[in-house]
Image (cartoon, rainbow, N blue to C red):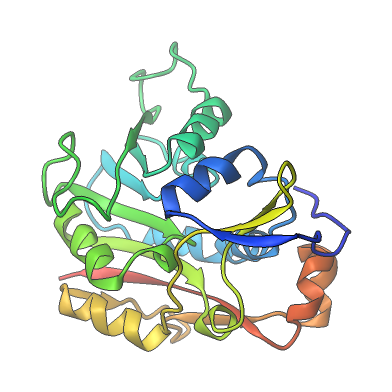
Amino acid sequence: MAQLTTPDPPFNAIRYLPTNEAYDKWAKVYDSDGNFLQALDNLELKTIFPRFLASIKSPKPWRLVDLGCGTGRNTALLLGVPDSEVIALDASKGMLEVARSRLSPNPALEGVGDQPTLRLEIFDMLVTSTPPPSIKPRTVDAIISTLVVEHIPLPAFFAHVAQLLRPGGVLLLTNMHSEMGGISQAGFVDTETGEKIRPTSYAHTVEDVVLEARRNGLEVEIGEEGAGVLERAVDEDMVEKLGLRSRKWVGVTCWFGGIFRKA
């Protein structure tokens, strides 16, 4: 998707909302408002997503979960995996409506041969400590969760991941880096009111993420090149791909991502 070539839009006030309410409002423009961090995430997923799939060791068919699926950006990637069941979970009804429209599974293909099946469900990690009723604990082969944990306390997030994953299952996690999170946070300008809408956010450090994952029985997977959790700063060469809004972030580490395996 082409990124906007205009700078950040002006706003007249900042309004803080509960996360699911903020994303309900953001849903209609989330994929078109020039979010450079989403563009950076897409670039990094080109290399880390294939590594994620290769790290799944359980036999097919796979049960794959997009935890905090938003508008279905990464659910679409999971639907490219043959012989799998894909479950997309999010706390925002507005985001799930966009995801459902975007993905529009063909009923004629569901359950035929090795075509993946899809379920989209409301699930709020902040209001429950148990898995969704439709998913038995420890039955998920792999989870992808990108740009989500910024909005969730780490103990709650990793407790849910640990309950969902079967032993040996894997998690692909990406997030806003704490260096960027110490300066800014997720949000958008509501063009109807002129307000900057911000959900609840936490500037989790990589070290805290790795530690909390370990407390819940997950360890970072080290790739063939010795890479564990990757960290990315924006440089001048990226600006054309990421959009003009990324220029003010040149030199700042804005993204991190890694693969974690449950013992």
Residue at image coords 11%, 42%? 136
Q: Locate residue 220, reporting x and y percent.
A: 32, 78
| Placement of 126 over or under 191, stated as above or below | below
Residue at image coords 59%, 80%? 180
Q: Locate residue 133, reporting x and y percent.
A: 15, 36
| Placement of 56 over or under 251, stated as above or below | above
Residue at image coords 17%, 47%? 131
| Placement of 159 over or under 166, stated as above or below | below
Q: Residue furthest top?
A: 108
User: Which of 172 and 57 lies nearest the eye of the viewer?
Assistant: 172
Determine whether, in the image, residue 175 is placed left or right of residue 243: left
Q: Which part of the image, by quadrant, shows the C terminus?
A: bottom left
Q: Is residue 74 visible?
A: no
User: Which of 192 and 223 lies nearest the eye of the viewer?
Assistant: 192
Q: Locate residue 254, reporting x and y percent.
A: 60, 78
Determine whether, in the image, residue 157 is placed left or right of residue 138: right
Q: Locate residue 175, reporting x and y percent.
A: 48, 69
Determine whether, in the image, residue 1 is placed left or right of residue 244: left
Residue at image coords 41%, 61%? 52
Tally of marks: 0
Q: Can residue 247 be seen in this view?
A: yes
| Placement of 24 over or under 165, stated as above or below | above
Quarter holding residue 93 = top left
